[in-house]
Amino acid sequence: MAARNLGSTATPTATSADAAVASAFLQSTVGGEHVAKRRRARFHSLEVAEVRPLTADAVEVTFAVPDELADDYTYLPGQYVALRKDFDGHELRRSYSICRPPVRGSVSVAIKRDLGGLFSTWANTELVAGDRLDVMSPQGTFTSTLDALDGKHVVGIAAGSGITPLMALAHTVLSRSATSEFELVYTNRSTLDVMFLEELAELKDRYPSRLALHHVLSREQRTAPLLSGRIDAEKLDRMLDVLIRPETVDEWFLCGPFELVQLARDTLEARGVPAKHVRYELFTTDADRVEPRHGRPVVVERGEPTVAIEFTLDGQSTSVESPVSANESILNAALRVRPDVPFACAGGVCGTCRARVIEGSVAMTENYALEPDELERGYVLTCQSHPKSDRVVVDYDV
Protein backbone atom coordinates (compact mmCIF):
# COMPACT_ATOMS: atom_id res chain seq x y z
CA MET A 1 0.00 0.00 0.00
CA ALA A 2 1.36 3.37 -0.97
CA ALA A 3 2.10 5.73 1.90
CA ARG A 4 -0.07 8.82 2.13
CA ASN A 5 0.58 12.13 3.88
CA LEU A 6 -0.82 11.95 7.40
CA GLY A 7 -2.23 15.45 7.24
CA SER A 8 -3.94 15.49 3.83
CA THR A 9 -7.05 17.64 3.31
CA ALA A 10 -9.24 18.44 0.32
CA THR A 11 -12.62 19.89 -0.56
CA PRO A 12 -15.40 17.60 0.72
CA THR A 13 -17.77 15.92 -1.69
CA ALA A 14 -21.24 14.67 -0.85
CA THR A 15 -21.71 10.99 -1.70
CA SER A 16 -24.60 8.57 -1.77
CA ALA A 17 -22.49 6.35 0.51
CA ASP A 18 -23.06 8.82 3.33
CA ALA A 19 -26.83 8.45 3.05
CA ALA A 20 -26.49 4.68 2.87
CA VAL A 21 -24.42 4.62 6.05
CA ALA A 22 -26.94 6.76 7.90
CA SER A 23 -29.83 4.64 6.65
CA ALA A 24 -28.13 1.40 7.68
CA PHE A 25 -27.51 2.73 11.17
CA LEU A 26 -31.09 3.86 11.58
CA GLN A 27 -32.35 0.49 10.41
CA SER A 28 -30.23 -1.18 13.07
CA THR A 29 -31.80 0.99 15.76
CA VAL A 30 -35.48 0.53 14.96
CA GLY A 31 -37.75 1.82 17.69
CA GLY A 32 -35.44 4.59 18.77
CA GLU A 33 -33.07 2.31 20.67
CA HIS A 34 -29.55 3.70 20.55
CA VAL A 35 -27.73 1.31 22.86
CA ALA A 36 -26.68 -2.11 21.65
CA LYS A 37 -29.14 -4.71 22.83
CA ARG A 38 -27.78 -7.93 24.28
CA ARG A 39 -28.77 -10.90 22.18
CA ARG A 40 -28.01 -14.58 22.19
CA ALA A 41 -24.58 -15.16 20.70
CA ARG A 42 -24.78 -17.77 17.94
CA PHE A 43 -22.28 -19.01 15.40
CA HIS A 44 -23.08 -19.41 11.71
CA SER A 45 -20.83 -20.53 8.88
CA LEU A 46 -20.19 -17.57 6.56
CA GLU A 47 -18.29 -17.37 3.30
CA VAL A 48 -15.31 -15.07 2.99
CA ALA A 49 -16.09 -12.57 0.23
CA GLU A 50 -12.76 -10.74 0.26
CA VAL A 51 -9.41 -10.62 2.04
CA ARG A 52 -7.78 -7.23 1.55
CA PRO A 53 -4.28 -6.28 2.75
CA LEU A 54 -4.17 -3.25 5.06
CA THR A 55 -0.49 -3.29 6.04
CA ALA A 56 2.30 -5.85 5.79
CA ASP A 57 0.87 -7.46 8.94
CA ALA A 58 -2.88 -6.85 8.76
CA VAL A 59 -5.80 -7.76 6.54
CA GLU A 60 -9.44 -6.79 6.29
CA VAL A 61 -11.70 -9.82 6.02
CA THR A 62 -15.22 -9.34 4.63
CA PHE A 63 -17.86 -12.03 5.13
CA ALA A 64 -20.93 -12.35 2.92
CA VAL A 65 -24.14 -12.63 4.95
CA PRO A 66 -26.98 -14.45 3.16
CA ASP A 67 -30.47 -12.92 3.21
CA GLU A 68 -31.81 -15.53 5.62
CA LEU A 69 -29.19 -14.52 8.22
CA ALA A 70 -29.15 -10.77 7.58
CA ASP A 71 -31.25 -9.95 10.64
CA ASP A 72 -28.88 -11.95 12.85
CA TYR A 73 -25.93 -9.86 11.66
CA THR A 74 -27.31 -6.35 11.99
CA TYR A 75 -24.96 -4.39 14.19
CA LEU A 76 -24.12 -1.03 15.68
CA PRO A 77 -20.80 0.71 14.97
CA GLY A 78 -18.32 -0.35 17.62
CA GLN A 79 -19.55 -3.92 18.04
CA TYR A 80 -17.48 -7.05 17.40
CA VAL A 81 -17.82 -10.63 16.18
CA ALA A 82 -16.00 -13.75 17.34
CA LEU A 83 -14.43 -16.11 14.80
CA ARG A 84 -14.05 -19.83 15.46
CA LYS A 85 -11.72 -22.35 13.83
CA ASP A 86 -10.37 -25.79 14.64
CA PHE A 87 -6.59 -26.20 14.55
CA ASP A 88 -5.55 -29.84 14.72
CA GLY A 89 -8.46 -30.73 16.96
CA HIS A 90 -8.09 -27.67 19.17
CA GLU A 91 -10.78 -25.00 18.88
CA LEU A 92 -9.67 -21.36 18.89
CA ARG A 93 -11.98 -18.36 19.21
CA ARG A 94 -10.86 -14.82 18.52
CA SER A 95 -12.90 -11.63 18.78
CA TYR A 96 -12.45 -8.83 16.25
CA SER A 97 -14.18 -5.45 16.04
CA ILE A 98 -16.30 -4.69 13.00
CA CYS A 99 -14.45 -2.04 10.99
CA ARG A 100 -17.13 -0.87 8.55
CA PRO A 101 -20.30 1.16 9.18
CA PRO A 102 -23.50 -0.91 9.29
CA VAL A 103 -24.55 -2.36 5.95
CA ARG A 104 -26.91 -5.23 5.32
CA GLY A 105 -25.42 -8.33 3.77
CA SER A 106 -21.81 -8.16 4.91
CA VAL A 107 -19.57 -7.94 7.96
CA SER A 108 -15.92 -6.81 7.84
CA VAL A 109 -13.21 -7.18 10.46
CA ALA A 110 -9.52 -6.31 10.55
CA ILE A 111 -7.03 -8.92 11.75
CA LYS A 112 -3.51 -7.88 12.68
CA ARG A 113 -0.88 -10.60 12.74
CA ASP A 114 0.79 -11.10 16.12
CA LEU A 115 4.21 -12.69 16.33
CA GLY A 116 3.58 -16.27 17.37
CA GLY A 117 -0.19 -15.90 17.13
CA LEU A 118 -1.67 -19.01 15.53
CA PHE A 119 -5.06 -17.64 14.53
CA SER A 120 -3.92 -14.22 13.34
CA THR A 121 -0.98 -15.67 11.39
CA TRP A 122 -3.27 -18.17 9.67
CA ALA A 123 -5.77 -15.43 8.77
CA ASN A 124 -3.03 -13.24 7.29
CA THR A 125 -1.27 -15.95 5.33
CA GLU A 126 -3.81 -18.62 4.38
CA LEU A 127 -7.37 -17.28 4.55
CA VAL A 128 -8.73 -16.50 1.07
CA ALA A 129 -11.99 -15.54 -0.57
CA GLY A 130 -14.30 -18.54 -0.87
CA ASP A 131 -13.25 -20.07 2.45
CA ARG A 132 -15.89 -20.53 5.13
CA LEU A 133 -15.52 -19.66 8.80
CA ASP A 134 -17.74 -19.78 11.88
CA VAL A 135 -18.75 -16.22 12.75
CA MET A 136 -20.66 -15.29 15.91
CA SER A 137 -23.53 -12.83 15.72
CA PRO A 138 -22.40 -9.26 16.61
CA GLN A 139 -21.95 -8.45 20.28
CA GLY A 140 -20.68 -5.61 22.45
CA THR A 141 -21.67 -2.28 23.96
CA PHE A 142 -18.73 -0.18 22.77
CA THR A 143 -21.06 1.97 20.72
CA SER A 144 -22.67 5.38 20.63
CA THR A 145 -25.47 6.46 22.94
CA LEU A 146 -26.07 9.69 21.02
CA ASP A 147 -29.67 10.27 19.95
CA ALA A 148 -29.21 13.64 18.25
CA LEU A 149 -25.74 14.20 16.85
CA ASP A 150 -26.15 17.82 15.79
CA GLY A 151 -23.31 19.79 17.32
CA LYS A 152 -21.86 16.77 19.13
CA HIS A 153 -18.11 16.37 19.54
CA VAL A 154 -16.84 12.77 19.75
CA VAL A 155 -13.22 11.86 20.46
CA GLY A 156 -11.51 8.53 19.93
CA ILE A 157 -8.11 7.45 21.28
CA ALA A 158 -6.72 4.29 19.72
CA ALA A 159 -3.51 2.30 19.36
CA GLY A 160 -2.70 -0.16 16.60
CA SER A 161 -5.61 -2.45 15.80
CA GLY A 162 -7.71 -0.49 18.29
CA ILE A 163 -8.64 1.66 15.31
CA THR A 164 -11.05 -0.96 13.95
CA PRO A 165 -14.21 -0.11 15.95
CA LEU A 166 -13.44 3.60 15.68
CA MET A 167 -13.48 3.39 11.88
CA ALA A 168 -17.12 2.35 11.98
CA LEU A 169 -17.92 4.93 14.68
CA ALA A 170 -16.24 7.80 12.82
CA HIS A 171 -18.07 7.01 9.58
CA THR A 172 -21.41 6.88 11.37
CA VAL A 173 -21.00 9.98 13.53
CA LEU A 174 -19.90 12.14 10.60
CA SER A 175 -22.51 10.88 8.15
CA ARG A 176 -25.51 11.22 10.42
CA SER A 177 -25.19 14.94 11.09
CA ALA A 178 -23.82 17.89 9.16
CA THR A 179 -22.61 19.54 12.39
CA SER A 180 -21.12 16.63 14.34
CA GLU A 181 -17.37 16.45 14.88
CA PHE A 182 -15.05 13.49 15.32
CA GLU A 183 -11.51 13.76 16.61
CA LEU A 184 -9.07 10.86 16.58
CA VAL A 185 -5.76 10.37 18.36
CA TYR A 186 -4.20 7.30 16.76
CA THR A 187 -0.82 5.97 17.84
CA ASN A 188 1.42 3.50 15.97
CA ARG A 189 5.09 2.73 15.68
CA SER A 190 5.51 4.10 12.14
CA THR A 191 3.53 5.14 9.06
CA LEU A 192 3.84 1.62 7.66
CA ASP A 193 1.99 0.26 10.70
CA VAL A 194 -1.04 2.54 10.33
CA MET A 195 -4.09 0.44 9.53
CA PHE A 196 -6.69 2.08 7.26
CA LEU A 197 -4.26 4.86 6.39
CA GLU A 198 -5.87 5.51 3.01
CA GLU A 199 -9.42 5.28 4.37
CA LEU A 200 -8.66 7.74 7.17
CA ALA A 201 -7.17 10.18 4.68
CA GLU A 202 -10.20 9.84 2.41
CA LEU A 203 -12.51 10.40 5.38
CA LYS A 204 -10.52 13.54 6.21
CA ASP A 205 -10.89 14.68 2.60
CA ARG A 206 -14.64 14.22 2.82
CA TYR A 207 -15.05 16.01 6.15
CA PRO A 208 -12.06 18.39 6.42
CA SER A 209 -13.65 20.74 8.93
CA ARG A 210 -15.36 18.09 11.07
CA LEU A 211 -12.73 15.34 11.31
CA ALA A 212 -9.46 15.97 13.12
CA LEU A 213 -6.74 13.32 12.81
CA HIS A 214 -3.76 13.24 15.14
CA HIS A 215 -1.34 10.47 14.11
CA VAL A 216 1.19 9.80 16.87
CA LEU A 217 4.22 7.74 15.81
CA SER A 218 6.43 6.27 18.53
CA ARG A 219 9.36 5.24 16.31
CA GLU A 220 9.18 7.80 13.54
CA GLN A 221 9.93 11.48 13.90
CA ARG A 222 7.13 13.83 12.96
CA THR A 223 7.32 17.58 12.44
CA ALA A 224 5.34 18.26 15.60
CA PRO A 225 7.17 16.93 18.72
CA LEU A 226 3.79 16.34 20.39
CA LEU A 227 2.99 13.74 17.71
CA SER A 228 6.31 11.91 18.05
CA GLY A 229 7.18 9.30 20.64
CA ARG A 230 5.18 7.15 23.00
CA ILE A 231 2.02 8.52 24.62
CA ASP A 232 2.70 8.85 28.32
CA ALA A 233 0.94 10.84 31.03
CA GLU A 234 2.83 14.03 30.25
CA LYS A 235 2.19 13.82 26.51
CA LEU A 236 -1.50 13.04 26.95
CA ASP A 237 -1.93 15.96 29.33
CA ARG A 238 -0.27 18.20 26.82
CA MET A 239 -2.58 16.95 24.07
CA LEU A 240 -5.59 17.80 26.19
CA ASP A 241 -4.18 21.28 26.71
CA VAL A 242 -3.22 21.97 23.09
CA LEU A 243 -5.19 19.71 20.73
CA ILE A 244 -8.39 18.67 22.49
CA ARG A 245 -10.34 20.62 25.07
CA PRO A 246 -12.15 18.03 27.24
CA GLU A 247 -14.89 20.49 28.18
CA THR A 248 -16.00 20.58 24.52
CA VAL A 249 -16.24 16.78 24.14
CA ASP A 250 -19.57 14.94 24.45
CA GLU A 251 -18.39 11.31 24.20
CA TRP A 252 -15.01 9.57 24.49
CA PHE A 253 -14.13 6.19 22.98
CA LEU A 254 -10.88 4.51 24.05
CA CYS A 255 -9.57 1.34 22.40
CA GLY A 256 -6.19 -0.29 22.74
CA PRO A 257 -3.96 -2.15 25.19
CA PHE A 258 -4.69 -1.91 28.90
CA GLU A 259 -1.86 0.53 29.67
CA LEU A 260 -3.03 3.18 27.18
CA VAL A 261 -6.71 2.81 27.96
CA GLN A 262 -6.14 3.02 31.72
CA LEU A 263 -3.87 6.03 31.29
CA ALA A 264 -6.54 7.82 29.27
CA ARG A 265 -9.28 6.92 31.77
CA ASP A 266 -7.23 8.16 34.72
CA THR A 267 -6.28 11.35 32.91
CA LEU A 268 -9.84 12.14 31.90
CA GLU A 269 -11.09 11.43 35.41
CA ALA A 270 -8.50 13.83 36.81
CA ARG A 271 -9.78 16.42 34.36
CA GLY A 272 -13.31 16.05 35.68
CA VAL A 273 -14.76 14.11 32.74
CA PRO A 274 -17.77 12.07 33.97
CA ALA A 275 -17.20 8.30 33.64
CA LYS A 276 -20.59 7.90 31.92
CA HIS A 277 -19.21 9.76 28.91
CA VAL A 278 -16.09 7.58 28.61
CA ARG A 279 -16.42 4.22 26.85
CA TYR A 280 -13.49 1.89 26.52
CA GLU A 281 -12.57 -1.44 25.00
CA LEU A 282 -9.42 -3.47 25.59
CA PHE A 283 -7.64 -5.79 23.23
CA THR A 284 -5.13 -8.55 23.87
CA THR A 285 -2.72 -9.99 21.34
CA ASP A 286 -3.25 -13.40 19.84
CA ALA A 287 0.25 -14.42 20.84
CA ASP A 288 -0.01 -13.37 24.48
CA ARG A 289 -3.39 -14.91 25.13
CA VAL A 290 -3.53 -17.94 27.40
CA GLU A 291 -6.05 -20.43 26.08
CA PRO A 292 -8.68 -21.23 28.70
CA ARG A 293 -9.40 -24.86 29.39
CA HIS A 294 -12.91 -24.76 28.01
CA GLY A 295 -15.02 -27.39 29.69
CA ARG A 296 -11.99 -29.22 31.03
CA PRO A 297 -12.85 -32.61 32.56
CA VAL A 298 -13.57 -32.52 36.29
CA VAL A 299 -13.94 -35.68 38.36
CA VAL A 300 -16.22 -35.60 41.39
CA GLU A 301 -14.78 -37.93 44.04
CA ARG A 302 -17.19 -39.76 46.32
CA GLY A 303 -17.83 -37.77 49.49
CA GLU A 304 -16.06 -34.69 48.16
CA PRO A 305 -17.79 -31.34 48.89
CA THR A 306 -19.47 -29.93 45.79
CA VAL A 307 -21.29 -26.84 44.63
CA ALA A 308 -24.59 -27.16 42.77
CA ILE A 309 -24.61 -24.93 39.67
CA GLU A 310 -27.84 -24.43 37.75
CA PHE A 311 -28.10 -22.28 34.63
CA THR A 312 -30.81 -21.39 32.14
CA LEU A 313 -29.99 -21.04 28.46
CA ASP A 314 -32.52 -20.74 25.64
CA GLY A 315 -35.28 -21.50 28.11
CA GLN A 316 -33.74 -24.80 29.19
CA SER A 317 -32.43 -25.27 32.73
CA THR A 318 -29.42 -27.51 33.33
CA SER A 319 -27.62 -28.55 36.51
CA VAL A 320 -24.03 -29.60 37.12
CA GLU A 321 -22.06 -30.50 40.24
CA SER A 322 -18.70 -28.80 40.70
CA PRO A 323 -16.10 -29.95 43.26
CA VAL A 324 -15.15 -27.19 45.68
CA SER A 325 -11.49 -28.15 45.28
CA ALA A 326 -11.63 -27.58 41.52
CA ASN A 327 -12.50 -23.88 41.92
CA GLU A 328 -13.75 -23.95 38.35
CA SER A 329 -15.58 -21.06 36.75
CA ILE A 330 -19.30 -21.10 36.10
CA LEU A 331 -18.52 -21.13 32.37
CA ASN A 332 -16.25 -24.16 32.60
CA ALA A 333 -18.79 -26.10 34.62
CA ALA A 334 -21.59 -25.16 32.22
CA LEU A 335 -19.56 -26.14 29.15
CA ARG A 336 -19.07 -29.63 30.56
CA VAL A 337 -22.79 -30.29 30.10
CA ARG A 338 -23.83 -27.70 27.48
CA PRO A 339 -21.22 -27.02 24.75
CA ASP A 340 -23.47 -24.31 23.28
CA VAL A 341 -22.98 -21.95 26.26
CA PRO A 342 -21.88 -18.60 24.75
CA PHE A 343 -18.32 -17.31 25.18
CA ALA A 344 -15.63 -15.72 23.07
CA CYS A 345 -12.51 -14.36 24.78
CA ALA A 346 -12.91 -16.15 28.15
CA GLY A 347 -10.71 -13.41 29.60
CA GLY A 348 -13.25 -11.02 31.10
CA VAL A 349 -12.98 -8.56 28.22
CA CYS A 350 -15.73 -9.18 25.67
CA GLY A 351 -18.81 -9.84 27.81
CA THR A 352 -20.21 -12.62 25.61
CA CYS A 353 -20.58 -15.02 28.57
CA ARG A 354 -22.62 -12.53 30.62
CA ALA A 355 -25.37 -13.97 32.83
CA ARG A 356 -27.41 -12.85 35.81
CA VAL A 357 -27.03 -14.44 39.24
CA ILE A 358 -30.49 -15.46 40.43
CA GLU A 359 -29.47 -17.30 43.58
CA GLY A 360 -26.24 -17.72 45.53
CA SER A 361 -23.02 -15.75 45.29
CA VAL A 362 -19.90 -15.73 43.11
CA ALA A 363 -16.55 -13.95 43.01
CA MET A 364 -15.29 -12.48 39.73
CA THR A 365 -11.56 -12.59 39.03
CA GLU A 366 -11.55 -9.96 36.26
CA ASN A 367 -14.13 -7.62 34.72
CA TYR A 368 -13.45 -5.32 31.80
CA ALA A 369 -16.84 -5.66 30.15
CA LEU A 370 -19.68 -4.99 32.58
CA GLU A 371 -20.88 -1.53 33.55
CA PRO A 372 -21.52 -0.61 37.22
CA ASP A 373 -25.29 -0.66 36.72
CA GLU A 374 -25.07 -4.20 35.32
CA LEU A 375 -23.12 -5.33 38.37
CA GLU A 376 -25.73 -3.77 40.64
CA ARG A 377 -28.43 -5.77 38.86
CA GLY A 378 -26.58 -9.02 39.47
CA TYR A 379 -24.88 -9.60 36.12
CA VAL A 380 -21.53 -11.38 36.05
CA LEU A 381 -19.03 -12.70 33.53
CA THR A 382 -19.33 -16.45 33.93
CA CYS A 383 -15.83 -17.06 32.55
CA GLN A 384 -14.45 -15.17 35.55
CA SER A 385 -17.03 -16.15 38.19
CA HIS A 386 -16.36 -18.80 40.84
CA PRO A 387 -19.04 -20.07 43.25
CA LYS A 388 -18.91 -18.82 46.83
CA SER A 389 -22.09 -20.51 48.04
CA ASP A 390 -23.30 -24.11 48.13
CA ARG A 391 -25.73 -23.41 45.28
CA VAL A 392 -25.54 -20.93 42.44
CA VAL A 393 -28.27 -20.25 39.87
CA VAL A 394 -27.55 -18.07 36.83
CA ASP A 395 -29.63 -17.11 33.82
CA TYR A 396 -28.10 -16.44 30.40
CA ASP A 397 -31.47 -15.47 28.89
CA VAL A 398 -32.35 -12.37 30.92
Image: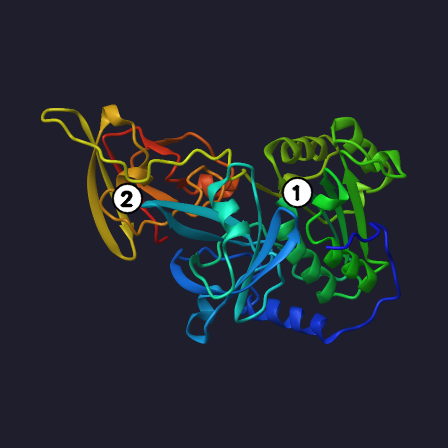
Q: Please tell me which of labels 2 and 1 falls first in the chain.
A: 1
What x and y, as percent, mark residue 387?
30, 31
Q: Secondary structure at mark 1?
A: helix
Q: Is residue 385 left or right of residue 196?
A: left
The residue that label 2 is drawn on is 335
What x and y, as percent, mark residue 188?
72, 40
Residue extending furthest toward the front: 126
Residue at screen point 72% across, 55% down: 1
| Number of other residues with Cα within 10 Å of mark 1, as a class: few under 14, some 14 to 19, many 20 or more | some
* Residue placed most toward the observer, 121 or 291: 121
* Residue placed most toward the observer, 332 or 197: 197
What x and y, as percent, mark residue 224?
89, 38
What x and y, as percent, mark residue 343?
39, 46
Q: Amino acid at mark 1?
A: Gly
**Looking at the image, is 290 positioned above or below residue 395?**
above
Q: Is residue 36 left or right of residue 329?
A: right
Q: Secondary structure at mark 2?
A: helix
Q: Is residue 36 left or right of residue 195?
A: left
Q: Amino acid at mark 2?
A: Leu
Residue extending furthest toward the left: 302
* Residue placed most toward the observer, 220 or 343: 220
